[in-house]
């Protein structure tokens, strides 16, 4: 049995405005009906696979649980990184956690934001690599290249790859090459793209860290030994974790190890590292046009038009090599060759203090999500969705009163000493200063419209009395 | 004294998504803080000018009154066209209306969707043309050309124009020329752009129709004789109006008349006939970039980026010759050379039945405006703004109940037999089937949030009992 470890800490800005710090790209439906994270979890499930482990950031933990529940996958563990420390500590934490219950188990390390359309073929390749990994090799997966890509790392083999598939020894890692080198490798036929996916046994991994990165091993071991279990999450201990070196698994271990093999993979794969990659993976038509959502292309070529919400229509006319992504709070229009400069735009917005730089209109919380429908001077209207059985914290506000109108489901509402059930089409008034809470006692989502009025409407005007999600005073929601 | 006649019936689609059938471009703030219509009314006011007449469509009458009130201009008359019949009937209706009270008065006919930045210089030119118009000439205004424009009509003079300014005889109208002809005219120095602006005496105008378009004269006279005065609007009679030929003033009269003069005008002018013109008039910077609203250009050239709402950020990266206009419900991205194809996009959207083709999210009504903040299955949330002293009709709904929360000002609310004052931060529930009305008895705008719940939420679920604006059963709002 193989246990997947899904690396889910990324916060890429290259796919802004869809991907934001508060909701990075692995959670977005970039291609198809599931998020990249959901598709990754599903791809590595079924015969031969144990339930996955996930390692992610604290801000994303409830998105992870919600998205896994949506696709009916129960994780073996969800590890929470106190802060991002790149892939070496994350992979090692997974290996140590798995080793504790299943010594010498096989672990498949995979980023959760890649696209691999043929899941069955990929599973076959993973399972074919198992004997090599069981024999103590660190197996990395190599993708058959179809272009001289300079944005990927490459893997060099000693001979032509065997796509039957069969694991072969790795000769060398090649960092992102220049165009000439990439072209030479493409034509040479002995190089593959490095997908950053590994199959290894936990003991081989730990041994490799012992040899090549003993300080990282000691730190991660301490962070795991002192970890707290909180609502089912394994929170790695902050102090040893924060002291770790920020280093990738490639630099820390792989480039120094001598027990490396490559499993060639013949199918499609992309890391969706920019909007140009999304365009390529979206299946452009004969004119090179790829469309998402309610978008219309008139005389366009080699262009991606994505309208992310059903109520916002995007029209492109006479465009060539353009990426346009429309969202209600942010619109990106970029030349396709400039896809990598999207992060510049995000930096510029952040500089201006624009919320769009890092947060989505829809704000995910442990209990569900909310979005602001309108803010204007002294009032704000929100849509709030509360999951069955979930509850917001018991709280009060200094500067605003609230009207709640339930539009779907049933709410249990506490206002000071009174508790009442509020059903669809009923409303409640929460006076300024009143101690209040809303819960969803039902079996379906509860949706309510909140109308706030007051002189200050910031999310930080909150005094929290009780919170089942153990959040801090002043933390949002 | 000169009476302006502002032609305000246009429903251009070339500036979609800002300009829509429900709210055409003259009412939009395309350049500066006032709408083109407001700027046109203000440009033709002050010394030497009487209050303006306006001719517009029924759907726009309350936008006209509201926008004129905003700039503190009281119109002499607002004529309502039962349907659009091009400029000849509209100009003649204005002339006949003015002739009835001020025989032989001077009338300045001007589209309300043009840009003329130097209002004082233009007024000077108009006043300088008055003696020529008083002498019985039909004076058309000619703009000094600065490029070989093929999208405008041109005016040919017998000699070089005198920009002191001095009216001169017109030699010929030139329809939209080809590029070579336009270049020849530009270099020849005896041709001007035809701005479609005229100064004439009402009796000369009527005499010209008598001679060149007597059927139009008879029809318009009948439509005006049978007009109804309704809430201060002059509603031209539908039957004779509908029977009129759809024809421009140029074709009906000007191109046949022999009493034509041209007043040269040396200042800037544009008809904003497409987004390329808006780009040109928006004062692009040294890179050719023009920005509107919260938009950011990174390495762009000859590009227009407009974000029409403060909460939607638009980013352009590496663009050349691109027009991008972002609105919450619609986004246009077009090559600048394809600006004239925007109407194709609107046609495509209309074909699909997309509301964005013709209507804005904000819906203007006699009593104010509303916008839908969210519609989802069985609920809808609206923001409703009611002007001081205004009232919605007394109405009921078959399929929905409504919660009203007042967030600014005070409402007088009728529910069945009960009338109550509802002030800021108070709410009212309107059960399904209840006969209800909201009014604003105050001196400032009243803003309320309406939360509708029900199985059908269409605007046409309305039974109307009383309406101060004399609208039909089933008509909206």
Image (tube, coloured by chain):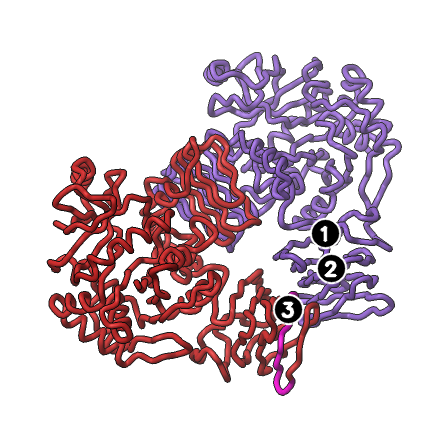
Chain colours: A red, B purple
Q: Which x, y percent locates residue A432?
A: 60, 79
B418 vs A413, nearest the viewer: A413
User: Label 1: which residue?
Assistant: B458
User: Label 3: which residue?
Assistant: A409
B421 vs A45, nearest the viewer: A45
Q: Which mark is residue B388?
A: 2
The answer to whether residue B281 shows anywhere in this view is no
Which of label 3 and label 1 is nearer to you?
Answer: 3
In the depicted structure, whether residue B172 falls above or below residue A367: above
Q: Secondary structure at mark 1?
A: loop
Q: Of label 1 and label 2, which has the lower sequence position? A: 2
Asked if disc 3 and disc 1 are in contact, CB closer than 8 Å, the reply is no
**Is A409 colored magenta in this rendering?**
yes
In the depicted structure, whether residue B40 falls above or below residue A252: above
Q: Kindly indicate whether the residues beneath marks 1 and 2 are on one polypeptide chain.
A: yes
A19 vs B50, nearest the viewer: A19
Magenta-drawn segment: A404-418
In the depicted structure, whether residue B400 falls above or below residue A394: above
Q: Secondary structure at mark 3?
A: loop
Q: Which mark is residue B112?
A: none
Q: Which x, y percent locates residue B397?
A: 79, 57
Residue neighbourhood size for the residue with mark 3, other residues' Cα within 10 Å, grouped as few (<14), some (14–19), many (≥20)? many
The answer to whether residue B262 shows anywhere in this view is yes
Where, quadrant-wise, is the N terminus of chain A in this rendering? bottom left
């Amino acid at each position: 049995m193989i246990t997947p470890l899904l690396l889910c800490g990324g916060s890429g800005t290259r796919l802004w405005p869809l991907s934001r710090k508060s909701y990075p790209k692995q959670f977005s439906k970039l291609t198809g009906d599931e998020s990249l994270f959901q598709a990754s979890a599903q791809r590595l499930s079924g015969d031969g696979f144990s339930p996955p482990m996930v390692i992610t950031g604290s801000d994303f933990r409830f998105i992870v649980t919600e998205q896994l529940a949506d696709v009916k996958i129960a994780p073996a563990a969800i590890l929470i990184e106190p802060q991002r420390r790149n892939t070496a500590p994350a992979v090692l934490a997974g290996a140590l956690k798995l080793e504790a219950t299943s010594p010498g188990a096989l672990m498949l390390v995979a980023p959760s934001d890649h696209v691999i359309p043929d899941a069955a073929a990929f599973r076959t390749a993973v399972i074919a690599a198992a004997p090599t990994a069981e024999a103590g090799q660190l197996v990395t997966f190599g993708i058959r290249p179809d272009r001289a890509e300079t944005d990927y790392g490459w893997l060099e083999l000693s001979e032509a790859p065997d796509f039957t598939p069969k694991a072969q020894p790795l000769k060398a890692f090649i960092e992102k090459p220049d165009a000439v080198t990439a072209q030479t490798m493409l034509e040479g036929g002995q190089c593959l793209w490095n997908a950053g996916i590994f199959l290894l046994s936990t003991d081989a991994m730990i041994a490799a860290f012992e040899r090549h990165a003993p300080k990282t091993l000691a730190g991660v071991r301490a962070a795991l030994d002192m970890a707290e279990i909180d609502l089912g999450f394994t929170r790695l201990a902050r102090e040893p974790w924060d002291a770790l070196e920020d280093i990738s698994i490639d630099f820390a271990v792989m480039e120094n190890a001598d027990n490396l093999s490559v499993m060639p993979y013949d199918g499609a794969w992309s890391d969706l590292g920019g909007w140009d990659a999304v365009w390529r993976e979206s299946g452009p038509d004969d004119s090179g046009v790829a469309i998402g959502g309610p978008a219309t292309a008139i005389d366009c070529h080699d262009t991606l038009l994505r309208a992310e919400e059903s109520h916002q229509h995007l029209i492109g006319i006479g465009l060539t090599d353009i990426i346009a992504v429309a969202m209600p709070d942010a619109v990106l229009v970029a030349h396709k060759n400039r896809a990598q400069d999207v992060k510049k735009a995000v930096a510029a917005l952040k500089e201006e203090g624009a919320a769009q730089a890092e947060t989505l209109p829809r704000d995910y919380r442990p209990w569900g999500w909310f979005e602001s429908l309108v803010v204007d001077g002294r009032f704000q209207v929100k849509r709030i969705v509360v999951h069955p059985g979930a509850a917001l914290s018991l709280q009060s506000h200094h500067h605003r009163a609230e009207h709640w109108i339930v539009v779907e489901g049933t709410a249990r509402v506490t206002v000071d000493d009174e508790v009442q059930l509020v059903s669809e089409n009923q409303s409640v008034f929460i006076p300024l200063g009143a101690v209040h809470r809303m819960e969803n006692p039902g079996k379906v989502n509860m949706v309510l419209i909140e109308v706030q009025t007051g002189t200050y409407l910031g999310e930080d005007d909150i005094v929290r009395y009780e919170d089942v999600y153990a959040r801090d005073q002043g933390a949002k929601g």
